Image (cartoon, rainbow, N blue to C red):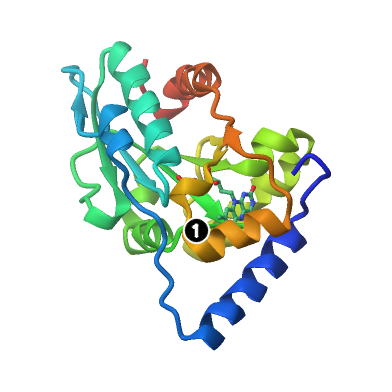
Amino acid sequence: MASGISRRQFVLGGAAVTGAVALGGAGYVAAKWAPEDAAEGLLRETMGDGMSKVLVVYGTKTGCTSGIAEKIGETLAAGGVTVDVKPAEDKPSPAGYDAIVVGSGIRASSWHGAVKEWVSVNADALKSTPTAFYTACLTMGTNPEKVDEVRAYTDPLIAETGVTPVALGLFAGMNDPKKFSLPERLIMKMMKAPEGDFRDFEAVAAWTTETAPLLGLS
Ligand SMILES: Cc1cc2nc3c(=O)[nH]c(=O)nc-3n(C[C@H](O)[C@H](O)[C@H](O)COP(=O)(O)O)c2cc1C
């Protein structure tokens, strides 16, 4: 996206490939877990042993956002909090937590379906518990000046559910073609999206530390 991929291009690219898949009759299978995700420590679902309890829920297609979820968990745990880090697809209950952090990768300017559904289903609990959102996407890695565009990715979800996050983290994601399905690889190729892992874990830790007091954690 060095040349500046716009939101419109992501949406149009997605529509073109979806059409191609439908015509070809092929199933759409998004790349999911990879062995290296476990190597990154994603099996550590609970961290820390503090009195306050935080739930970090994430949606990911390639492991990018789960790595960020884990960094958030690690940072909170280092500050004396007990943290559970869980995929939205597991439908974790938000009950019993003092604060919640929800994040997702992006496809065509939108959070992944499982996370949006989790937020919708649990909207009442999220409205009565301090909740922060975060987004991980390629635009923040390649065109960080488009921060307003990225911030707007969650506007529809916030409007639909009435869940107002106390903070919204906007983080650089990655483009690892090996982890994408064929249609996804085609989209990224069409857009000449630069390959690489643009995640900045120091920025994630800094955001988490800044956000902790807003979540009521001292
Ligand atoms: C089909 C497709 C569409 C994408 N659409 C967007 C987009 O609209 N905006 C963006 O910034 N990144 C977009 N990305 C990049 C992803 O958000 C990025 O790879 C992110 O790291 C994915 O996180 P995850 O693997 O945890 O889901 C797209 C990637 C693919 C494959």
Q: Is residue 7 above or below residue 148?
A: below
Quadrant of the rendering where the C terminus is positioned: top left
Quadrant housing residue 39 = top left
Q: Residue at x 31, y 47 (%)?
A: 33
Q: Does residue 111 appear anywhere in the picture?
A: yes
x, y percent for residue 195: 62, 39
The residue lying at 54 percent from left, 66 percent from top is 183
Using a 10 Å C-alpha cutoff, classify the residue at mark 1 as few (fewer than 14 neighbours), some (14 to 19) or many (20 or more). Answer: some
**Any atom of ligand 1 within 8 Å of the CB at mark 1?**
no
Residue at x-position 67% and y-position 55% = 189
Q: Is residue 37 left or right of residue 180?
A: left
Residue at image position (32%, 27%) is 40
Task: Name, please, the residue furthest toward the right.
Answer: 3
Q: Which element is circle 1 on?
A: loop
**Relative depth, front residue between 193 and 93:** 193
Nearer-the-camera pick, 130 or 48: 48
Q: Which residue position holds label 1?
A: 162
Q: Position of residue 12 (x, y in %)?
A: 71, 69
* Quarter of image, res 19: bottom right
**Count of numbered circles in the view:** 1
Q: Where residue 82 sits: x, y (%)? A: 21, 24
20 to the left or right of 191: left
Can residue 55 be seen from the camera position used here?
Answer: no
Vertical arrangement, residue 93 with respect to residue 17, above or below: above
Left or right side of 74 for 45: left
Location of the N terminus (image quadrant)? top right
Q: Where in the figure is residue 88, as x and y percent of width and height?
A: 31, 52
State the residue in front, 58 or 197.
Answer: 197
| Amino acid at circle 1 | Gly
Of the pair 218 and 62, the residue shown nearer to us: 62
